[in-house]
Image (spheres, rainbow, N blue to C red):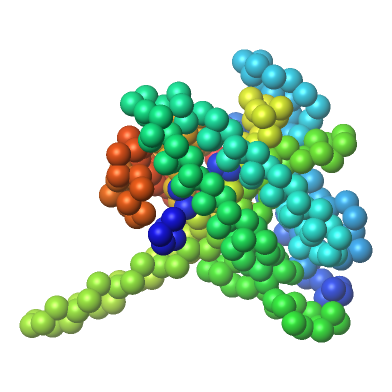
Amino acid sequence: MSRPRRPLCELVRRGPPAAVPSLPPPLSITEGTRCVAQLPALPFPPEPSSSAPPRISLPPPAMGDAARGPPVAIRPFRAHPPAAAAADAASVVALFTDGMAAVKADLPAVPAMDADAVRRLADDVDAFVAATLAGDLDAIPTRYALRGGAEHGRSDTEPPRPPSAARRGYFFLAVDAATGAPLGCVGGKPSRPPAPPAATGGGATPPPAPPPPPAVELMRMAVAPAARRRGVGRSLVRALEAAAAADGVGRVHLATLSSMVPAVRLYEACGYRVAARVPLAALPPPDTLDVPVDEVTMERWLGGGGGEGVT
C-alpha cells in the first residue's frame, strides 16, 4: 500500500485501588421486552487478583438458528494481570485474523468481481491486517483506553485514574460459558468530535453550538465460524452499547464493506442505519480503482446515558 487509510472493514483496540466506590445496579441488555443479559457493575479498576472476570450469561439461540451450542458469556477484556491480558490479546488476534481470512475467501463470490479485482482487494486486506496487528491489537488496553489499562509507567501501588467518558474505550470477548473458549470479540474506541465550522466574515458571530455527545467507533467485530447463528455478534454489539450508554456516549458508528453482507445485515438488525456509502475507487490507495465494492458507514444513536435507547 502506498499510504495508510481508514480501516477497510470491521468484522470483526497492579495493584488494587485505595478505595473501591459503591457499585451501581447491573445494566440490563434487552431484546424488545426480553432480558438478554445483564452487564454486571464493575469496580474501578477490576480486581487484579481475580482470575474469573464477571460474565454475562446468554440464553440459548432462538429456534430459527441453524447452529446450537452451550451457553455463551460476554466479559470485558482483562487489562491485568499481565498473563490474563496476554491470553485475551492472543484470543483477539486469532479471532480477527481468522475472520479476515474468511473475508478474503468470500471475495470471489462478490458480484462483478473479476479475478484481478479479487487479487487487488485481497492484497489490500492483507495490508490492512498487518497494519492492524502492528498498530492496534498490539496493545489493546492502551489503544482502546480500557479501565485500568490506559496508563503506562506508573507505580503498581498508585491507584489508576479513570479516563473521562469522552476518552474511554471498551473491548469485550464472547466465550463458551462452560470451557472459556473464545467465540467472538468487539472493541469500541472513543471518537474525536468534529471540528467546529470556520467563522465567516461579516455579521454578528453566532453563539457556539453545544458540543456533540461523546461517540464511540465499533471496531474489530469477529465471531468464530463455529459460533455463528447463536446470537454472539448481536450480544457483543449490545454489551458494547450498554457500557457506552452508561458512560453517556450518545452515538456508536462503524465502517464495513458492502461485500460483507452478513455484517451489514447484523448491524441493520441491531438498529444501525447507513450514514454514507463511498466507492473504494474514491479512496486511497489507487489499487482499488476498479473494485466494485463500497465502504459503508453506519451509526446508531443511543439516546443518552444510563442505558437509555439501548433496547
Residue 54 position within the rendered picture, expressed as x and y whole percent measured from the top left: 81, 50
State the image coordinates of residue 245 (x, y, percent, origin top left). Answer: 56, 55
Position of 256 compared to 92: left or right?
Answer: left
Q: Is residue 83 above or below residue 227?
A: below
Residue 106 visible to an observer of this rendering? yes
Residue extending furthest left?
202
Q: Which of 160 and 118 is in front in this view?
A: 118
| Residue 20 position in % (x across, y down) | 82, 71
Residue occupying the point 70% across, 49% down: 92
In this figure, what is the number of numbered marks? Answer: 0
Quarter in which the N terminus is drawn:
bottom left
Q: Which of 17 and 87 is in front in this view?
A: 87
- The answer to which of 53 and 140 lies nearer the viewer is 140
Judge whether 268 appears above or below 12 on screen. above
Image-based side of 143 in relation to 214, left or right: right
Seen at 33% across and 72% down, the residue is 195
Q: Is residue 237 visible?
A: no
What residue is drawn where x is 64% and y is 44%?
A: 97
- Residue 80 figure quarter: bottom right
Residue 274 at what x, y percent from top left? 36, 41
Q: In this view, does 150 lie above or below 221?
A: below
**Residue 162, above or below 103:** below
Q: Which image quadrant: the C terminus?
A: top right
